[in-house]
Amino acid sequence: MRTTLVCVAMELRLRSREVSFPRRPLLMGIVNLSEDSFSGDGTADLDAAILNAHNQVSAGADIIDLGGESARTNRGPISVKEEIARFTSFIERWEIARKLTSPRDAAQLWPPILSINTWRLEVIEELIPHGLVEMVNDMSGLPDARRATVCANYRAALLIMHSVGEPKVPHLTTQWDDVMASMESFFADKIALAIAGGMDARALILDPGIDFAKQRDDNLTVYRELGRLQQFACPVMVPVSRKTVIGEVLDLPNPQDRDAGTIACISLAMDRGAQMFRVHNVSAAWQAVKALHALLEKP
């Protein structure tokens, strides 16, 4: 592999702590509180969801990313009330459950960050003030400054995903003349919008939106040229796990068969400077990033 490791010094500011980079990439474990998960690992059973989160943290997850509804575009949205209820039920029990876990090694963030994956402003406004959620994973692409303002008021980190159009709506025919140039322009605008809404730039995270409004070749281009996003001095989180593009390349229609391809994508993205990965198989990803960090780190 051509060595292009990008080591940009930066900070991620959270409510009561800071994370400094470069360091071993952070792993975001996925906990879907819905049975509609594309990967088949979601559950509406609260006990099962708590156990899943516990196991992911024990396997090395630095972040638990809660999803109240599936991002699949062939499923209709649930109500705001139902999404809030799903999140609240989990959060009320998670603090107790988390205290029964311990970090896998000394480099793991502790306690793990709790993130909510949502595109609804009303959900963010309801949950962030209570103080247990440290991060908002915004799949809406920050259409205006209101989400940023809520996060700024309560010092939560904000993850901005690159996409086009409304969430939960398929964008299967989107064409890009230059996907990376468009992404650079998008993030420049969204960072400025978030700062105008009161955010500290050091509390922002960028997500290139693999598979969202992108075709196979677009996604492959994003992986190859991911290092271009380091210009913004914000951590880059790659939602790498079991993605459609992996299935297309490997001819694997079942997402659960794509973990080896996921590790390959983690390897390339780390080489291009990515600081965070969103994954289903935390244990495999933890082994990969730990080994790769040792291989790529300069003495």
Image (tube, helix red, strand yellow):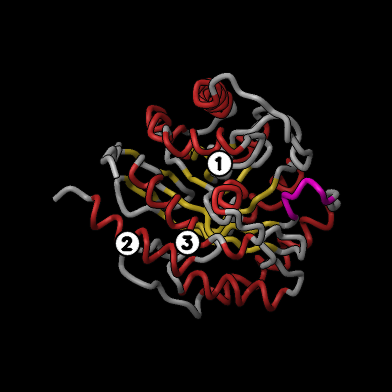
Q: Which mark is residue 260?
A: 3
Percent of width and height locating residue 72: 75, 50
Please tell me in which quadrant of the rendered image residue 209 appears: top right
Instruction: Identify the secondary structure beneath mark 3.
Output: helix
Tell me if residue 234 comes above or below residue 72 in the rendering. above
Q: Nearer the viewer, mark 2 or mark 3?
A: 3
Q: Nearer the viewer, mark 2 or mark 1?
A: 2
| Residues packed near mark 2 inside 10 Å, few (<14), some (14 to 19) or many (20 plus) | few
- How far apart are labels 2 and 3 at the CA level? 16 Å
Q: Is residue 107 something that shows in the picture?
A: yes
Say which label, 3 or 1, has the lower sequence index.
Answer: 1
Instruction: Identify the secondary structure beneath mark 2.
Output: helix
Percent of width and height locating residue 51: 61, 77
* Residue in front for this viewpoint, 180 or 230: 180
Q: Nearer the viewer, mark 3 or mark 1?
A: 3
Q: Amino acid at mark 2?
A: Lys
Q: Is residue 152 something that shows in the picture?
A: no
Q: Is residue 135 left or right of residue 129?
A: left
Instruction: Identify the secondary structure beneath mark 1.
Output: strand
Which residue is disc 2 drawn over? 290
Residue at 44% from the left image edge and 67% from the top image edge:
284
Q: Amino acid at mark 1?
A: Leu
Magenta-highlighted residues: 70-75
